[in-house]
Amino acid sequence: MSDKVSIKRLKGVSVNEQSLQVVREMIQKKDSLDIDVLELKNHVTIIDTGVNVKGGFKAAEYVTRAALCGFGEAKVIMAKYGSIYLPAIVAYTDLPAIIGISYYVWPEVIHPPHVEVNEYTAWVSGPGKALRQKPEKVYAKLDYKDEGNVAVLLVQPRGKDLPDEAVTEKLASACGVSPENLYLIVTPTNSIVGSVQVSARTMEDGFWRLTEYYGISYDRIEAMMTITPIAPISPRVFREPCPWADDMVRHGGVLHAWIYSKEGEDLQRIAEETVIENNPNSFGKSFYQLAVVEKKYIDPKYDLIRLAKEGYGFIMAELCLYDTRTGRMYRAGRVHDNILEKLLSNPW
């Protein structure tokens, strides 16, 4: 008997077609969003949101919606953190399985930037991987296959570089589509859109921990919502101490999740183990310290389960779990305003 779960709302739906609807809106509004649309010689469409253009918060809202394949919403707001106001992203989905379908990183195809290779590197996410049911760990749990013929991917390079034809051919082949049916949204880390869409991934960190680490099935996670502050843009990111989007997630990210529990499932323990204040290996440290100096997070050889177990990854400031079977709420952690302010003013 298969352990895979089927999500009724995904039956017969192409998540890439759903995402493409958002992308087409972006293309129509490219001037007002301050983004650019390019067609390479191989007819791959690139939506540049921060390499040769500025992009902005409205573009970031669209990109977050595209990552959620139209099954969620996103809004940039201002929120007060201690004595300061910061921009923050509010994002939600009532179909959290879509987060697994769009998971970050496709190292088998394009190396992530922390792997030192003499070629184009980027974090690759988005629904395009669903056409080939990748990553396999997702489709070992989820009974779904996108039968469409278009692919949408998010490409997040560390620097200000667009992928060339060779890279896009590789991505098209990996998705199993012809190049003219591939749409790439490029969101450099050092851009407004890049920073915003990483902050929105507080939901992804929570979804990964709940499903991969604690083994909660995709169909039992019914909804998710986050509010997470947005980091400033730093051209020196990865090269010197500066506040990163990951710092905002870890010390300022708040996640609410609605879960249909099983008898005996300890949701309070899960909440407590997921917040950064209960993980001394990370609490109070900048992400630069962990990732660059200590090399505890982005080492490509590091096991993700171990990363979660040791408290280096898939953590946030505050987690609230609503049990839709019993009506109870379980909460742990808090937003650490003092640490956020220190990171922003003096990122040590």
Image (cartoon, rainbow, N blue to C red):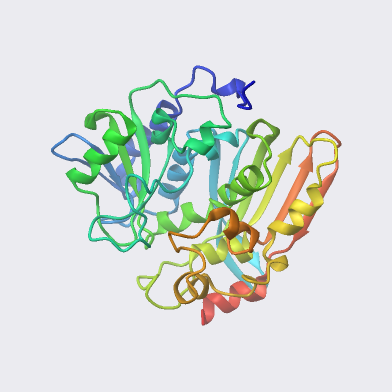
Residue at position x 46%, y 24% in the image: 145
In the rendered image, the vertical position of residue 122 relative to residue 257, given as above or below: below
Closer to the camera in the image, 110 or 247: 110
Which residue lies at the image location 62% right of the left edge and 53% below the top edge? Answer: 227
Task: Give the quarter of the image for residue 324.
Answer: top right
Rendered residue at 58%/51% (across/down): 205
At x 52%, y 56%, the residue is 303
Position in image of residue 296 (x %, y %):
51, 68
Q: Is residue 101 above or below residue 60?
A: above
Q: Residue furthest top?
A: 12
Residue 287 pos. (x, y %): 52, 70
- Residue placed farthest to the front in the image? 1
How many labels, in total?
0
Q: Quadrant of the N terminus?
A: top right
Q: Is residue 229 above or below residue 98?
A: below
**For this view, does 151 lie left or right of residue 276?**
left
The percent coordinates of residue 283 (x first, y second) are 65, 71
Whole-percent x and y of residue 307?
Answer: 57, 60
Q: Is 139 left, or right, of 311 in this rendering?
A: left
